[in-house]
Amino acid sequence: MSSAEFWRLIDRLGLPNADALNLIDYPGKLPASGKRPRFRLTTHQTRLANALAEVGTALEAVGETPAWLHQRNHSSPFSGRPPLAIMVVGNGEGIGEVLRFLGRLALRKSVAR
């Protein structure tokens, strides 16, 4: 995945730039100009970015918009925090927690039909 593809994904998910870089363990920071950095994603960063893409796909599957990532959620594992907060502090595992939650939600919705 190129950095351009990564930034398109971030735009699609509506994530703040600083959070996006944090989610893929980017070692640098946003420049003072606010311009998005261009970089080569490492294998680890690509894996995390692909997991973010899966979050987008899972949101579509359950009929949610990317705004869902920013809304407080009282279900486990969120405890009143937005899913994005879990993803950011989770060091990669947070993305997995959100994906598992969305998977369970998709399963419940499919059974309820």
Image: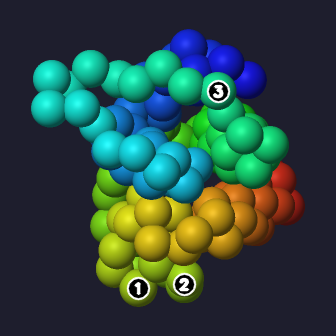
Kind of residue sitting beneath label 1: Ser
Q: Using a 10 Å C-alpha cutoff, classify the residue at mark 1 as few (fewer than 14 neighbours), some (14 to 19) or many (20 or more).
A: few
Marks 3 and 2 sit apart, C-alpha to C-alpha, by 35 Å
Please state the horizontal and vertical placement of residue 40, each as a whole percent of the image.
64, 27
Residue pointed to by mark 3:
40
x then y, percent, for residue 78: 46, 78
Label 2: which secondary element = loop
Q: Which quarter of the picture shows residue 112?
A: bottom right
- Residue 60 visible, this angle: yes
Could you tell me if the residues under marks 3 and 1 are in contact, i.e. CB atoms within 8 Å? no
The secondary structure type at the circle numbered 3 is loop
| Numbered circle sitting on residue 76 | 2
Residue kind at label 2, given as amino acid type = Ser
Task: Name the residue beneath numbered marker 1.
Answer: 79
Residue at 56% across, 14% down: 4
Between 48 and 55, the one lying in front of the other is 48
Sooner in the amino-acid sequence: mark 3 or mark 2: 3
Residue 17 coordinates in the image, percent (x, y): 34, 36
Tell me which residue sits at (48%, 20%) in the image: 38
Direction top: furthest residue:
4
| Real-space Cα separation, disc 3 to disc 1, in angstroms | 35 Å
- Amino acid carrying mark 3 in the image: Arg
Q: Is residue 67 visible?
A: no
Rendered image quadrant of residue 102: bottom right
Marks 3 and 2 in Cβ contact (< 8 Å): no
Work out whether residue 108 or residue 89 is closer to the camera in this orientation and state it. 89
Q: Classify residue 23 as left or right of residue 2.
A: left
Tell me which label, 3 or 1, sits earlier in the chain.
3
Residue visible at 45% across and 72% down in the picture: 89
